[in-house]
Amino acid sequence: MKLLLDILQGLGLASATGLRPFLPALLAGALATEDLGVDFDHTQFAFLESPWWLLALALALVASVFARRVLETSRGEAALSGLGIGLGALLCAASIDDRHGTWWYGLIIGAAFAYLASSVSRQLFARVRARFASANDAAAAAALPFYGEAAGLVVAGAAILFPPLSLLAVGFLIALLVTGRRRSDQKYAGLRILR
């Protein structure tokens, strides 16, 4: 049962970093320093709660706020996605390594779920950003990254404090993926009819 809870915690953390990489990883590291729901001490991933790592994450978070325009490009989003996938893999494996000797599969699971979250959030934010652009609502479009940060923070906090809630986050991501694909298929089906 403990292994299942640790895997669920890892899935939630990976999903959170897939949404936005820095704030969920910073929260996990900060809570781990106080051993609140997660602890990386005496694991292969003890650096995830070290002061220099938390400082680097905080600086990256601040830099991402100031570089928002660059990060909203396709290259910027791809870079954030890659960081989120890497951090998700590390956090998932670290969550498993906390109480179990075999943790390597957490890297694979974490990367997969962070990739799922990243793909879904990029598609969703692109659709919402396009709607705001067509409505000439620049203020709402500018707030989108902050909504992503808040969503990542909530998912990470829920995963740490009550790991079974990670299933809700993953289910929600899958539902968004399915509905996004359905909308895309309907859009292209309409274009085929016009030909």
Image: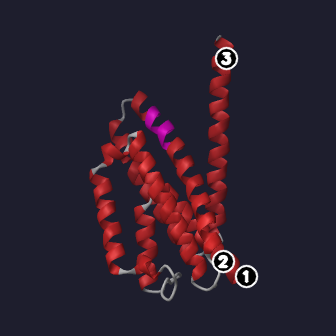
Residue drawn at (32%, 61%) of the image: 60
Q: What kind of residue is marked 2?
A: Leu
Q: Does 49 appear above or below 77?
A: below
| Residue 132 percent location from the top left of the image | 42, 34
Q: Is residue 4 above or below residue 100?
A: above
Instruction: Calculate the distance from the C-alpha at mark 2 to the C-alpha at mark 3.
Output: 47 Å
Q: Reading the chain from its start, which is encountered first: label 3 or label 1?
A: 1
Mark 1 is on which residue type?
Met
Q: Which residue is mark 2?
A: 5
Badge 3 element: helix
Label 1, label 2: how many angstroms apart (C-alpha)?
6 Å
Q: Residues within 10 Å of mark 3 (few under 14, many from 20)?
A: few
Res. 80 visible in picture? yes
Q: Secondary structure at mark 2?
A: helix
Give the mark nearer the N terminus: 2 vs 3: 2
Q: Position of residue 130 (x, y in %)?
A: 45, 33
**Which amino acid lies under the numbered mark 3 shown in the image of this protein?**
Arg
Give above or below for 149 relative to 5: above
At horizontal 63% and vertical 18% (from top left) the residue drawn is 191
For the residues marked 3 and 1, what is the alpha-carbon distance in whole angstroms? 51 Å
Residue at 44 percent across and 68 percent down: it is 25
Give, as a single range, the part of the protein colored magenta. 125-131
Q: Residues within 10 Å of mark 2 (few under 14, many from 20)?
A: some
Which residue in the structure is indicated by mark 3?
Answer: 192
Name the residue tied to disc 1.
Answer: 1
**Helix, strand or loop under label 1:** loop
